[in-house]
Image (cartoon, rainbow, N blue to C red):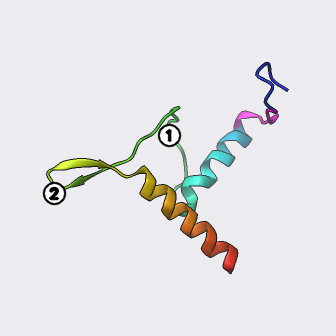
Amino acid sequence: MSQTGKLMPNLDQNNTKILNLTVPQRMDLYIKEILITVAHVTFYEFNVDLNHWIKTLNLVIKELAKENNEEKEM
């Protein structure tokens, strides 16, 4: 366990990259590589009718959950 009391996996850099790549590949199988990683990401979509940006992370999460449920049903 780490100093924070959390169980930490013992992964080398290559295995970590492979695991991180599986998440975006669920949405797009043509993704081949992660070029950079960050600690926090927020998705926005520009709404032309309202003329401003709208946070869309909830939509991304709902889409991932929907895809996950569809895979389980197969």
Q: Amino acid at mark 2?
A: Val
Label of residue 35 in the image: 1
Q: Is residue 11 magenta?
A: yes
For marks 2 and 1, the one nearer the N-term is 1
Q: Is residue 30 visible?
A: no
Q: Quadrant of the N terminus?
A: top right
- Residue 26 location (% of width, % of height): 57, 61
Residue at the extreme bottom of the image, as rendered: 74
Residue at 24% in and 47% down:
53
Residue at 56% in and 58% down:
25
Secondary structure beneath dot 1 equals loop
Q: Is residue 13 visible?
A: yes
- Residue 59 location (% of width, % of height): 43, 58
Quadrant of residue 64 within the rendered picture: bottom right
Secondary structure beneath dot 2 equals loop
- Assess disc 1: are there few (<14), some (14-19) or many (≥20) residues with their C-alpha within 10 Å of its C-alpha: few
Q: Is residue 49 above or below residue 51?
A: below
Q: Amino acid at mark 1?
A: Leu
Q: What span is colored magenta in the figure?
A: 7-13
Q: Is residue 8 above or below residue 73?
A: above
Residue at the extreme right of the image, as rendered: 1
Mark-to-mark CA distance, 2 and 1:
30 Å
Residue at 56% in and 69% down:
67
Q: Quadrant of the C terminus?
A: bottom right
- Residue 21 location (% of width, % of height): 61, 49
Mark 2 = which residue? 48
Question: Is residue 42 toward the left or the right of residue 71 in the image?
Answer: left
Toward the viewer: 6 or 9? Answer: 6
- Residue 66 location (% of width, % of height): 55, 68
